[in-house]
Image (cartoon, rainbow, N blue to C red):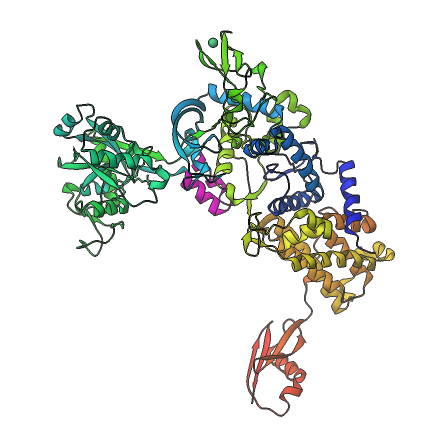
């Protein structure tokens, strides 16, 4: 019984593929599980992060398949996107060729891990059929006002030649190439995700049990709902004249109406129309105009990390309740696209306002006091709850009450109204790139923007393009753009923007859910998605906590609204895996600390890689690569495989009739360990996900089996262990199970036998003067006296001619003797 991972793994991978072992059944009366690991981008080779992701997913899929569920466990490729174009520029390879060659290579790599994917549902998002159905519902979204075209300032990345969504800008830089992002005015297509802001927020509630709380919080903050008061500040008469009567007021938003009497200035964003007007008409001295222009150049993201900056605009507004005049400033901390792009500033109670006031020596006015009363020389804003002072008729109210009272006062006197604001912005999906799904629209001189006719879909990419890295290849292509208007038939131009690749990854799970037999004719199948959705277990990296998960949630809701599915949330349970590190750092080419999965599989086999991945750390924690632990994993599998020779032919007939009472102590312990592992298995897959503890339990069980010689106990041990380890080291377990049990044990009918957990003795450590000397065996409910007398007898040689000055018995744990 020599363990030869190569032969075993090759054999089973071939068998699985030939027998289509992992195709889901069409029988929709069976209970289902949809297990999904986030699909990969076909970058060229798989890395350890992939290995971890897919080994985790595969473990779930195999566990539930074995437990008699109809399991959908698909794989595909997120195959549009920039790297394909970059490769085209660098290596003069067509993006399509590069992409599909990578897919072929990576498919084999994944196959060599023995992953139980459905092969018939595999697809790539750049497949024309996928584009076709995507374009169809993009048109539906357009018709239902969920997608629209508008011109705005956008984040522009010059090296990538593309617009970036806010979410794709990280600290002012492109998320892909790290170049500082510029601001540029441009028309583009937007998905109206803000229409679903409230629903996206509310439905997080239903995910509380089964999504990491960290992810829920990140989504909540990203959506960023706040409730407050919106009102207008009227410009003073003088100021209106200064502004050539072009403006008479502007709107502000506050979440703290209770602080309204503490307003000492107001601040506008550098992009506010009034500020722009002042700059354009040079209504301030030149040095001020220049200072404002400097502020405008800095992107909003960078402003957030700068010191507070501002310029006095030499105009005033009137306080809506007191009638006082209040100076107006332009300030770098006011966001242009939020709450009207202007604030009422309350430096005594808002930290940003406070810092700005300190910087420019503006007055503070405290209107809320805590138990310490008025603060003489404040060093920061007072943001605690308290009681109102200096607030006319509202003085004396608790500030929480005052919030409501002042809001009510504004509404009653038609001065303002309650307002709910969201941080979430509509999602810009236009990209000026070739390797993406074309937006299915046509520009016609007489009809304007017209969606393409459904029968003309897909609008496929031209294959004869030159990719230079400059501009959009679709735009510079000599003929592709030319088309006729779907409405009036006259000459028209095709839209050359392509969709953000996040669009494709926002609904791919619905593609898998559709029976491949119907895909070509129906697109997303409602009947199939009714059965397979929602995804029962989703597994992927925490880096997708906001973008991908929010967009997928939105698309699920939008497609539901458009009648494509009945699903409202895509992912029932979410597991976010930790990173794979080496020498304490993320594996990366630049650090030179990459471990190549192919080499590990070559050297040890896939089962070793899989076991290590699940054993080295709980799935949500970072996993540190460790060569000797990989070695250890290999040795365990080898031992597990080779010791299966201890299961005799005869015992296979008799092991189901073990008489527990008649067993020796070692035999009993071995059985107990085996059943403990079985118990753990159910717990781990359904609840805790701590595969490492399941593996540790199995290792203990194998060790315990080796301390005894009962053939029936051996047989039973292998019957159970090869069942519970199948999701983790499938090749080895299929081989063992085939040899011994003809896979009869690959089901969920193995019952836990309670008899094995009944203890007939307990081991206690005996410690003398703090040092463990020996162990004793006592009955589970032995009295203190009995325990002590057994302990003393066992430790006679240490205590013989000493005096015992203290005796401590910790039931079920230890005996402690202090001697002199
Ligand atoms: C006065 C005030 C007093 C405020 C106070 C806060 C505390 P969220 O929760 O983010 O919605 N604000 C409003 N519009 C803004 C903009 N365009 N740029 C920067 N800040 C803006 O916060 C809303 C609060 O942020 C508003 O309430 C406003 O400041 C500020 F003791 O108004 B507050
Ligand atoms: Zn037309």
Magenta stretch secondary structure, dominant: helix
Residue at far bottom of view: 801
Q: Residue at x 25, y 35 (%)?
A: 290
The segment highlighted magenta reads 200-222
Residue 54 shown left or right of residue 478 in the figure:
right
Q: Position of residue 463 (x, y in %)?
A: 61, 22
Residue 30 appears at what percent x and percent y?
68, 35
At x 40%, y 32%, the residue is: 425
Q: Can you say which quadrant of the picture contains the N terminus?
A: bottom right
Nearer to the camera, 178 or 578 = 178
Location of residue 93 (image quadrant):
top right
For residue 717, say whether it is visible: no
Magenta stretch: residue 209 in it? Answer: yes
Q: How many marks?
A: 0
Tell whether 755 sits left or right of 198: right
Horizontal side of 328 relative to 681 (left or right) equals left
- Towards the viewer: 502 or 197: 502
Say whether residue 172 is magenta: no
Give above or below for 41 relative to 614. above
The image quadrant that residue 180 belongs to is: top left
Give the x, y percent position of residue 16: 76, 40
Q: Where does residue 126 sit, x and y in percent of width and height?
A: 60, 28
Query: Image point 62% across, 76% down: which residue?
Result: 765
Residue farthest along the right direction in this orientation: 650
Q: Residue at x 53, y 16 (%)?
A: 481
Give the quadrant of the C terminus. Answer: bottom right
Return the residue nearer the eye: 56 or 104.
Answer: 104
Residue 80 shows up from this direction: yes
To which quarter of the image does residue 234 belong? top left
């Amino acid at each position: 019984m020599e363990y030869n991972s190569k032969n075993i793994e090759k054999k089973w991978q071939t068998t699985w593929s030939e027998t289509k072992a992992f195709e889901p059944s069409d029988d929709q009366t069976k209970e289902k599980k949809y297990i999904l690991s986030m699909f990969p981008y076909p970058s060229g080779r798989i890395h350890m992060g992939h290995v971890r992701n897919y080994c985790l997913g595969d473990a779930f899929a195999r566990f539930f398949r074995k437990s008699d569920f109809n399991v959908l466990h698909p794989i595909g490729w997120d195959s549009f996107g920039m790297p394909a174009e970059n490769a085209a520029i660098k290596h003069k390879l067509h993006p399509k060729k590069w992409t599909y060659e990578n897919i072929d290579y990576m498919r084999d790599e994944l196959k060599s891990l023995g992953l139980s994917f459905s092969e018939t549902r595999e697809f790539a998002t750049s497949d024309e059929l996928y584009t076709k159905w995507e374009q169809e519902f993009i048109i539906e979204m357009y018709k239902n006002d969920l997608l629209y075209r508008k011109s705005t300032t956008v984040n522009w990345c010059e090296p990538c030649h593309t617009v970036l969504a806010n979410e794709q800008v990280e600290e002012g830089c492109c998320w892909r190439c790290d170049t500082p992002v510029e601001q540029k005015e441009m028309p583009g297509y937007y998905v109206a995700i803000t229409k679903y802001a409230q629903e996206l927020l509310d439905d997080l509630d239903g995910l509380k049990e089964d999504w990491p709380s960290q992810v829920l919080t990140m989504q909540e903050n990203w959506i960023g709902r706040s409730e407050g008061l919106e009102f207008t500040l009227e410009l003073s008469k003088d100021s209106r004249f200064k502004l050539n009567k072009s403006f008479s007021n502007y709107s502000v938003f506050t979440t703290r109406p209770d602080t309204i009497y503490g307003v000492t200035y107001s601040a506008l964003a550098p992009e506010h129309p009034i500020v722009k007007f002042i700059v354009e008409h040079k209504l301030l001295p030149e040095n001020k105009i220049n200072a404002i222009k400097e502020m405008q150049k800095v992107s909003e993201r960078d402003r957030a990390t700068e010191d507070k900056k501002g310029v006095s605009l030499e105009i005033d507004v009137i306080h809506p309740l007191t009638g006082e005049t209040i100076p107006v400033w332009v300030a770098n901390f006011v966001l242009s696209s939020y709450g009207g792009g202007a604030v009422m500033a309350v430096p005594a109670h808002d930290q940003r306002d406070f810092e700005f006031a300190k910087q420019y020596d503006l007055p503070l006015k405290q209107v809320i006091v805590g138990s310490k009363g008025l603060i003489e020389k404040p060093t920061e804003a007072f943001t605690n709850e308290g009681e109102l002072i200096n607030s006319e008729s509202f003085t004396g109210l608790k500030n929480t009450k005052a919030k409501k009272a002042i809001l009510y006062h504004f509404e009653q006197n038609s001065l303002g109204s309650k307002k709910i604001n969201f941080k979430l912005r509509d999602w810009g999906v236009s990209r000026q790139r070739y390797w993406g799904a074309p937006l299915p629209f046509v520009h016609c001189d007489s009809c304007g923007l017209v969606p393409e006719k459904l029968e003309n879909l897909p609008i496929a990419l031209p294959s004869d393009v030159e990719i230079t890295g400059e501009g959009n290849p679709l735009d510079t292509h000599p003929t592709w753009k030319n088309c006729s208007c779907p409405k009036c038939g006259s000459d028209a131009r095709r839209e050359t923007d392509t969709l953000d690749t996040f669009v494709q990854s926002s609904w791919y799970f619905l593609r898998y859910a559709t029976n491949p037999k119907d895909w070509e004719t129906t697109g997303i199948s409602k009947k199939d998605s009714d059965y397979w959705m929602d995804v029962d277990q989703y597994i992927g990296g925490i880096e997708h906590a906001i973008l991908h998960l929010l967009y997928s949630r939105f698309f699920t809701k939008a497609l539901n609204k458009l009648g494509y599915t009945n699903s409202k949330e895509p992912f029932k349970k979410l597991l976010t895996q930790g990173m794979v590190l080496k020498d304490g750092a993320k594996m990366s080419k630049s650090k030179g600390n990459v471990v190549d999965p192919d080499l590990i599989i070559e050297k040890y086999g896939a089962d070793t890689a899989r076991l290590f991945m699940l054993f080295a750390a709980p799935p949500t924690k970072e996993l540190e690569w460790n060569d000797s632990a990989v070695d250890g994993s290999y040795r365990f599998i080898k031992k597990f495989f080779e010791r299966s020779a201890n299961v005799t032919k005869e015992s296979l007939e008799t092991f189901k009739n073990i008489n527990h009472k008649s067993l020796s102590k070692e035999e009993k312990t071995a059985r107990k360990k085996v059943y403990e592992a079985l118990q753990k298995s159910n717990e781990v897959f359904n609840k805790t996900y701590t595969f490492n503890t399941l593996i540790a339990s199995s290792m203990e069980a194998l060790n315990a089996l080796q301390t005894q010689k009962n053939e029936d106990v051996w047989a039973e041990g292998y019957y159970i262990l090869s069942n519970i380890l199948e999701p983790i080291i499938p090749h080895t377990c299929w081989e063992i199970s085939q040899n011994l049990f003809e896979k009869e044990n690959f089901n969920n009918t193995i019952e836990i036998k309670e008899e094995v957990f009944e203890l007939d003795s307990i081991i206690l450590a005996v410690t003398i003067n703090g040092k463990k000397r020996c162990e004793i065996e006592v009955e589970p409910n032995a009295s203190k006296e009995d325990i002590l007398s057994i302990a003393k007898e066992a430790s006679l040689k240490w205590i013989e001619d000493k005096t015992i000055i203290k005796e401590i018995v910790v039931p079920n744990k230890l005996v402690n003797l202090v001697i002199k």
